[in-house]
Image: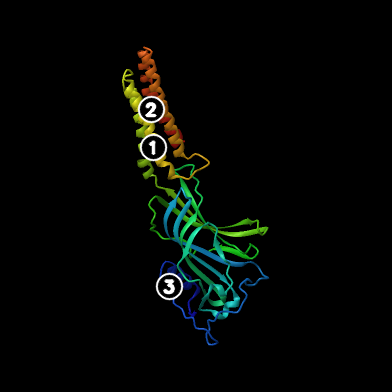
Amino acid sequence: MRRRNDSPFKRVALCVVALLSFAPFTHSDAAGPENPCAAPNLQTDIRPNADGPPTRVSVGIFMADLTGVSDPDQTLTGDFGVVQTWTDPRLDHLAGCEISLDDVWSPGLVFFNSGRLFTSRPREVGIGPGGSVTYAQRYYGTMASYHDLQDFPFDDQTFRISLLPFEWTEKDVELVVDDQVTGRRELLNISDWEILGIHSVISIRPAPARNDFTPYYDFLITAHRITGYYLWKVILPLCLIVAMSWCVFWISPELYGPQIGLSATSMLTLIAFIFATTNMVPELGYFTLLDLFIGGSTILVFLALLESLTVTYLVSSDKRMLARRIDGWSRVIFPLAFALLTVVIFFR
């Protein structure tokens, strides 16, 4: 434990700087009557001014990095600094000290998002004048995040990171946003998303287990998916497969072998393509834009195969003129149908 003489503003600034640094704390473990920073003797399960209004806790999250967003797993991976500040008059005599979090009352904020998170700083709080308490911690790892993928891959998402005082209700703890700490690093290690903005909000939600309400701190990350990968790696190849299936309309109906062979090849190629792109999104209970596009393309390729079989049957029945007319109509109808499908799905 150690004593220091920092102003509150300087102390918060140092917390943010420390969160972005991997340098560990150094402190003395000396104890005794001469130690002004000895652990206080108080009940940590009783909040400050327990008979008064809710304890006001300022919370801020600084996004140091965002390294990945997984649609199949519905998760995001990042590096976040969390700073909590509250006032406990019982600790006024410890101003300038840093002591263990376990030796003082704290709001016990936990992440509502399930996941695997690691911390990189000691569980210590800094005490300021008047008993102001600051706890700064750095978390990195993976958290669950709900993705609304109906417009995938041309979608925008709002990723939510939620904190709540697990053991307390709105009658005990009042959360407020600390704008001085809330923010993000400009350069993030994520290549397939454009971060449009971040902001924090406080909400009150039911806590059925306590038959009461609990305050929530939500850190919201608004992002736009960069679609270049999907245009070149998914949609363009799919369009080429569909166009390949139209080639049978320019093959003479008498050459039914190449017609059926090309149609079957187009169908098998499309099926293999579908299997290759299955893991892009989780198993959803609704269709995404890409699902609709792939489904519509599959139907058109299958109809092209049926057209080839129909033309082959007509040729074998000595109805070559009708077969040629059907091929002529198909050269116009199928491209128009595909263009209409594209417009309806992506430009509605």
Q: Do the residues labelled 2 and 3 touch (CB within 8 Å)?
A: no
Find numbered disc 3 in the image and state the secondary structure of the residue it sits on.
loop
Classify mark 2: residues with Cα within 10 Å, few (<14), some (14-19) or many (20+). Answer: some
Residue situated in front as seen by the camera: 205 or 77? 77
- Front of the two marks 2 and 3: 3
> Which residue has dot 3 on it?
24
Residue 192 visible here: yes
Which one is earlier in the sequence, the residue at label 1 or at label 3? 3
Which one is earlier in the sequence, the residue at label 2 or at label 3? 3
> Which residue has dot 1 on it?
272
> Which residue has dot 2 on it?
335
Which one is earlier in the sequence, the residue at label 1 or at label 2? 1
Q: Is residue 222 above or below residue 329?
A: below
Residues at marks 1 and 3, CA–CA distance in whole angstroms: 52 Å
Find numbered disc 1 in the image and state the secondary structure of the residue it sits on.
helix
Find numbered disc 2 in the image and state the secondary structure of the residue it sits on.
helix
Residue situated in front as seen by the camera: 193 or 41? 41
Q: Do the residues labelled 1 and 2 touch (CB within 8 Å)?
A: no
